[in-house]
Every structure is written in structure tokens, then in C-alpha cells.
Image (spheres, rainbow, N blue to C red):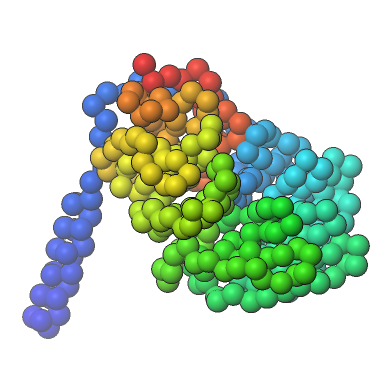
Amino acid sequence: MYKQILLASTIAIILFAGCSSKEYYKPEQTFNLSTSNMGDKLINYSRDGATLASGTVLTKDQAVKIKLDKGFYFINNNRNAAITADLQGNCNIVTQKGRVASAKFPQALVAGTLIGQYLVYVLQNNNYGIYDFKANRIIYNNEAHKAYAIDRRIANPLPVDKLVVIPTLDGKLVVLDMTTKKIAKEVFVSTEKSLNNIIFLGQLNNALIASTPHKMISLSSKGKKEYDKEIAEVVINGGKLFVFQKNGKIAKLDESLSVISEKKFKFAHFSRATVDEKKVYGLEKQGYLIVANRNLSKHKVYKAPEVDDFTFVSGNKIYYNGEIIDLTPLNYE
């Protein structure tokens, strides 16, 4: 009995010590920040969009009202149509006129990109392939290793000339030839066991940039470059790469992942971030919104409500906790 009490006390002390030693970001000065009521609620989000309870969809650029069937959520879009899916493997292609095509998969669709008549997809079980809407069937399918825990910000496939780069849920890039339906190349970004899916995939000048929460790589004619950091968010803007790290550092990089400038905000934990032609914005989980210039030499910190729900950036607005922050009037001076 005495040993049990001693063991329980020891565990309690360890747990208390762990909680009490956790450090938080504490800016020296903050400025008031006004928000507006969303009148809606974020119910689902991915790398390229978010779904509101009302059926409104937030893309990277704007809020769009499209007709979502019950239980469906937004995956991705191009200029002509949006990809929507539910948890049962159903997929609808939707335009402003309504549903124009449908597909059924054996697992829920978690990422997808439309390329002409084809949907290049990634499923919840980490199968990936091509669905042909003219033939109404899967014309190519492959299996990647199972991923048991993933980050919700799943990157969508990226077309590059006659190829498509497919980001898998286990941290791998599969380069697939759309003409021959054969794999041209496979590259692992990182090999961690958990939360290792590709959360960012994009092009910067002549380089392909891909990141998991654990590592970023750049692929170009100059070879493969690595940026071995714990990563919270990635943004490409104005020919530069902005990386928001889990240790509170913001870094500005070029396409070879060389550091141009950086600034550390000690113990900051970034929830969401964006960059425009003049400013860098990082929303910290306690509700601090850091606004900096693009060289990261000047910054100003605003105080907003603590982040306790989904967050998403659409255009010049941040949506979270039922509120909207308009970034336009904010500055770093």
C-alpha cells in the first residue's frame, strides 16, 4: 500500500513539474486588435480550403458559396470546379451550377486535383491514383504504406508539365507520368513514424518545394536540398519561401533553402500564417498575431482571442473561433 501511494505521488510530481515547466510566448508589448463576428463556424479544413457550417467554402483567395451535399466538405478547386467529398468515399465535382460529376472510392478522399477529365487522388488509407470521369472508373491505383496519424493540412497533388507530383500520407512524393501512367520518380521528404504526411507542396522559381511537419526539401536541376527543422507552416510569396518553425522562428529562404533572414519569437507556437507583398503574419496559439516586414527586421504584436478551434487564411482575412481578423489595416510599425 505504501509503495502504491509513493508511486502515485511520484507520478503526480512528475506530471506537475512537466506542466509547470512549459514555457509560453510573452511579447514585451501588444496592441489591441478588433475582430468581426463570422456568423458561421469552421467545420473542416485542409491545405487549400475550409468548409463552413453554412456550406460556404473558403479558398485561399476568397469565400465562395457552392452547393454542398449533406456531409460533404471541400477538398480543392481550380478555376472551373471544386472537389468535395464525404467520409464514406463519395466524391462530387461541383460548379456554380451544382454537381456536374461524381465518383465512388473504397475509402474517403483526403486530397485531389483535377487535370482535365482526370482526378488525381489520395485516399485515407494512403492509396493514390487517377480517376477518369469520362470512363467513370479508376484507371490507375497504387498503395503507399499506411499512415496511422496525420496532420490535417494534407497537400494536394501538383501538376508539372506532363507529370503530376502526388504527396502521400507517409512523407513521400510520387512523380507520375500522366501519359504512360508510370512512376517516374519517388522521393521521401522525411521518414518519421507519426504526423509525417506532406503538408506543403509548391513550386518556387525552378524548384519543387515539399514539407512535412519534420523536414522540408527542395528539388531542382541543382539536386536535392534539405531544411531539417520542425515546421508549423510554409508560405511561398513574391519569389521567396517563408517558414514558420515550431520553435517560434520565422525564416525567409530562397529556392535552395538558404536563409536570407530570420527572426525568433521565443516559445511562440504558430497556428496559422500568411504573407503578402509587404507583410508577414503569424498567428500564435495564445492569440498573439505577429505582423512583420518581409525582411523580418521590424515587427508588431497584436492581441486577439486564444486559438481553440480550426483556423484558416482566405485572402486578407484569418477565420477562427467564429471570428474574422482583417489583416489589411495591420502594420509592423
Whether residue 307 is visible, yes or no, is no
Vertical position of residue 219 compared to residue 173: above or below:
above
**Viewport quadrant of the N terminus:** bottom left
Q: Which of 212 and 10 is in front in this view?
A: 212
Vertical position of residue 189 compared to residue 144: above or below:
above
| Picture residue at 52% right of the left edge, 39% below the top | 236
Q: Which of 315 and 57 is in front in this view?
A: 315
| Picture residue at 68% right of the left edge, 65% below the top | 176
Whether residue 214 is visible, yes or no, is yes
Q: Which of 192 and 23 is in front in this view?
A: 192
Is 306 situated left or right of 181 in this image? left
Is 246 situated left or right of 127 in this image? left
Q: Which of 298 and 85 is in front in this view?
A: 298
Vertical position of residue 5 compared to residue 14: above or below:
below
| Picture residue at 30% right of the left edge, 47% below the top | 247
Quadrant in the rendering for residue 251: top left
Residue furthest to the front in view is: 222
- Residue 84 placement (x, y as % from top left): 74, 54
- Residue 100 placement (x, y as % from top left): 89, 52
- Residue 288 placement (x, y as % from top left): 37, 33
Is 116 situated left or right of 187 in this image? right
- Residue 56 placement (x, y as % from top left): 71, 40
Is 216 situated left or right of 17 in this image? right
| Picture residue at 38% right of the left edge, 44% below the top | 258
**Viewport quadrant of the C terminus:** top left
